[in-house]
Image (cartoon, coloured by chain):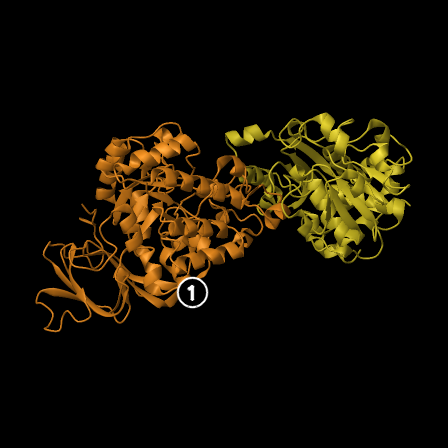
Chain colours: A yellow, B orange
Amino acid sequence: MSTPRTSHAIRFPHRHLLGIKDLSATDIDQLLDLADSYVELNRQVEKKQNLLRGRTQINLFFESSTRTQSSFELAGKRLGADVLNMAVATSALKKGETLIDTAMTLNALRPDLLVVRHPDSGAVELLSQKVDCAVINAGDGSNEHPTQALLDALTIRRRRGSLMGLLVAICGDILHSRVARSNIYLLNRMGARVRVVAPPTLLPAYIERLGVEVFHDMRAGLQDVDIVMMLRLQQERMHGAFVPSLREYFHFHGLDYEKLSRAKPDALIMHPGPMNRGVEIDSEVADDIDRSVIREQVEMGVAVRLAVLDLLSRNLPANAPAAGAK
Amino acid sequence: MSAAAAGKTIPGAHLTHLTHLTAYVNARMIDPASGYDGPGELLTQGGLIVDAGEKIFADGIPEDCEIIDCDGKVLCPGLIDMKVFTGEPGAEHKETLESASLAAAAGGITTIVTMPNSDPVIDDISLVEFLKRRARFGALVNVHPMAAATQGLKGEGMSEIGLMRQAGAVAFTDGVQAVANAVLMRRLLSYASRFDALIVQHIEEPSLAAGGCMNEGEIATRLGLPGIPDAAETIMLERDLRLVELTRARYHADQLSCAASVEIIREAKRQGLPVSCGVSAAHLALNENDVGNYRTFFKLSPPLRREEDRLALVAGIADGVIDVIVSGHNPQDQESKRLPFAQAATGGIGLETLLSVALGCFLDGNIALPKLLACMTINPARLLGLPGGKLSKGQPADLVLFDPGKSWVVDGNKLRSKSKNSPFEDRHLQGVVLRTVVAGEAVFIRQED
């Protein structure tokens, strides 16, 4: 298969990808189907496409990132776009230029696709109101990280065929996690059942209203689940502020074989990375080739971002009339 | 003593002689102090009310008297707004006393009480005097400063309460933040009572509110924003009330935001503690849902809370637990509001919309008009020891004439405040101010549309 573009007309009625909140089940299915076809492209020797030839993609990261940024960069380049990475230290931002000024400046560079990560919830949406190009949220504060949820979904779907009816436990720092929120929205929309497992200090108020079952005990929370999603615990939250210590956290909430034994025998282990080995996940479990799909997630990340760039570019002004005809 | 509009060219204010007589006839007169709501007539001479009653002109209107036909509209004391931030001194680009007073006049407000959170902080006699002097020459309405309760608003040492009280500070507060230290708060209450000075507290436990930018709840969780729980407010309020019990000093809780606080104040009043409290018009009309998708004009302090809290606040006005309605007018420019929600400044403007928003509660049928107006006239006047707020002989001729039956749409760009951050932008509001009078002179007259 040389071209992954599906032959039937795809309707993706969104100019930006700001969050899973805005997507329907159909939107998500289409994205995942397209991403699935891109997995093959990624495995070929010749990976280059012309789809985004002449297009400019700017990766604007107000917060450092290794895998998300490189994954977007690779995806853009594989589709033939000119990709520019801009790392903006937030400290410099505080000194003068506001987010809106930055947006206006970038807009004048006439990009077609803008990939943005920002430490504040809602910042990417605010920025999207001020620019003419398509904006992709690569993570905003504790709000959303839609491409992460999509790549998680793609990973699960390729292993299990469908998300429908699966029991998924999301474990760890739910309070500060945009990955958790995007995954909760996506999994619920696609018919999976979601549990969150965390100490009460790492759960936001009224989290159950997002349609999840709440567990504080990891063993109970992992009982019979199909998927175990671990979240990263930030360094600054480990020592007394939200949990007393690393060793206490690992003792009660770290994923080891003993706790994992409660899950279904073939349960998959996922982690958005970067991992804190020995904090939220035991090293051996993380590397278990039969259970852990953590490296596969990274591969799916590129495929999902290829699909997102592809779909949004079809709605760009110059392409708009041709999109339906394809 | 009143900072009248001397020397200003205001349409209709062409006569400024001290003995100038004005007769207001054919009014629906509401005097919240006595509870009177009925047909009425009122006579002012110079800056004072000479007479008011149902039929004071039975023997005819005096000669050389300007006659204002009120056409059955409501004539009541000018409003007193006891929580106003201006940008003066330090942020005049956001608001000056003059621009704030224009907005106040258009909103039927004849007295504003300014908050000490300026740059520099109002924590010194010379600064209190500076504000009063600036107001005398620049403001259309009466301006009374609240001064800092602690030096530099640092929450460490008492400010010169006695001296600043003499210089004209009407109350003492740290404004946007609470006096968190319990010992200091106890001593402030205790010391201030010797001058009969009111201590006003922003009821929010700082450690619980730290980093929070909206009500803690489902919406904050969905938006990924750190929340502020009710408990941040109730803990500070309960603590302060225990200190009031100890000191028996007068205490005013600046702004309630949740149902639990209304119950706490109700119980404290039942016990006979010398406490009072306020609420902002915005909190009577809006709730956390208005934040929507990170709309920073709805980022207020205290935060907008749940609908059941809003209803409890409205009920608190109706049954008299809440004493005062304020605008909480807090001008912020675009640069302070067009930011990610967590970084955006808190506060909304509200002088021009105060009366109309508060009237919304009346139109819902919850509250009698005199009772509602008392929260913006006689009640703050009594708490702060200010003249005005009632329609009786010898009182300042500070009046507002408004049409409660007419509605208008808030056009952000037409608001008179220098900053346009109104949470009521584009909303339909009820009640239109027709004329505002300060010390006998019209400082605002609505032009026909």
Q: Is residue B131 left or right of residue A273?
A: left
Q: Residues within 10 Å of mark 1 (few under 14, many from 20)?
A: some
Helix, strand or loop at label 1? It is loop
Q: Is residue A9 left or right of residue B253?
A: right
**Which quadrant of the figure contains the N terminus of chain B?**
top left
Residue type marked 1: Asn
Q: Position of residue B226 (x, y in %)?
A: 58, 41
Q: Which residue is mark 1?
A: B366
Q: Is residue A194 left or right of residue B239?
A: right
**Which quadrant of the figure contains the C terminus of chain B?**
bottom left
Q: Nearer the viewer, residue B35 or A290?
A: B35
Q: Quadrant of residue B200?
A: top left
Q: Quadrant of residue B425?
A: bottom left
Residue that appears at 74% across and 45% down: A183
Q: Position of residue B19 (x, y in %)?
A: 9, 56
Image vertical order of residue A26 relative to residue A282, above or below = below
Q: Quadrant of residue B216?
A: top right
Q: Is residue B302 left or right of residue A277?
A: left
Q: Nearer the viewer, residue B341 or B56?
A: B56
Q: Position of residue B337 (x, y in %)?
A: 49, 43
Say if residue A113 shows up in the picture. no
Q: Nearer the viewer, residue A113 or B356?
A: B356
